[in-house]
Amino acid sequence: MYKLKFPLLLLGLALPAAALAQSAEEKGLEIATAAKAYDQGFTDFTANMVMTLKNKSGRTSKRQIRIRTLEVEGDGDKSLSIFDEPADVKGTKMLTYSHGLEPDDQWLYLPALKKVKRISSRNKSGPFMGSTFAFEDLGSQEVEKYTYKYLRDEPCGELSCYVIERYPAYKFSGYTRQIAWIDTAGYRLVKAEFYDRKKSLLKTLTAGDFQQYLGHYWRPGTMDMVNHQTGKSTLLEWQEYEFKTGLTERDFRSQTLKRIK
């Protein structure tokens, strides 16, 4: 979906009555659909990531992770996270097949047990590897996963953002709703608030240091998830993005998860 650079009224053209009567729900869905369409075509990418966990007292620990992601036509992305450091988590791997309304398929390989564990769809709200990110936060955010409502436009730092509300449409989500700030130029997710099953603010995600790749695709350099109820936070620092590396479906098989390097 392409954004209109100039309002039709400024060009002397009348807007159809239906467009003028667009509901907040329709506009919210339109923005989410446009954001998904804008990011299509990247094919695949790899990246390195430093995950810094901070507890309530401010003590930190770091983890080194390699990320691989494959774009899948007609379905959600496939992603693989491989932990390299520290020693107690080295060799841990998580594989995610994202879907729309169907539950994401997720597998976790724990080298200490030498076993691949499938993550139940009922447990996706649990924390991932002790971080403030839940398992359900780690799949690609398919449009069908939510229903939407447009709230407003407002400045977000140096950018201008759409502010939309989205409500999980899939079973067993740990959230009742999310509020997302999406920039109007490149459809970057700049900020998101997550509300728990009691409808209280649970977490806030803030993304920054965006870089553009292949002259089009925006990716964050940092993602900071703060849990307001526990005082814990997790900072993800992304490095060394590479696109169109030649990854295929064969690189994302649960049957070979133990052997993937």
Image (cartoon, helix red, strand yellow):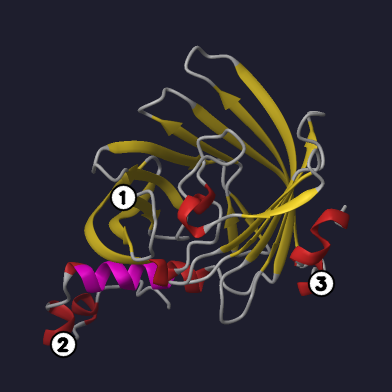
Neighbourhood count class around disc 3 (C-alpha, 10 Å): few under 14, some 14–19, many 20 upward: few
Question: According to the image, label 3 marks what residue?
Answer: 250
The percent position of residue 45, horizontal first and vertical second, equals 72, 61
- Residue found at x 62% / y 59%: 106
Secondary structure beneath disc 2?
A: loop
The percent position of residue 209, horizontal first and vertical second, equals 56, 41
Contact (Cβ within 8 Å) of mark 2 with mark 3: no
Question: According to the image, label 1 marks what residue?
Answer: 179
The percent position of residue 12, horizontal first and vertical second, equals 19, 83
The percent position of residue 85, horizontal first and vertical second, equals 79, 32
Q: Quadrant of residue 113?
A: top right
Secondary structure beneath disc 3?
A: helix
Q: CA distance from mark 2 to mark 1?
A: 29 Å
Q: Amino acid at mark 3?
A: Arg
**Is residue 67 depicted above or below 39 in this figure?**
above
Side of 248 where 151 appears, left or right:
left
Q: Amino acid at mark 1?
A: Ile
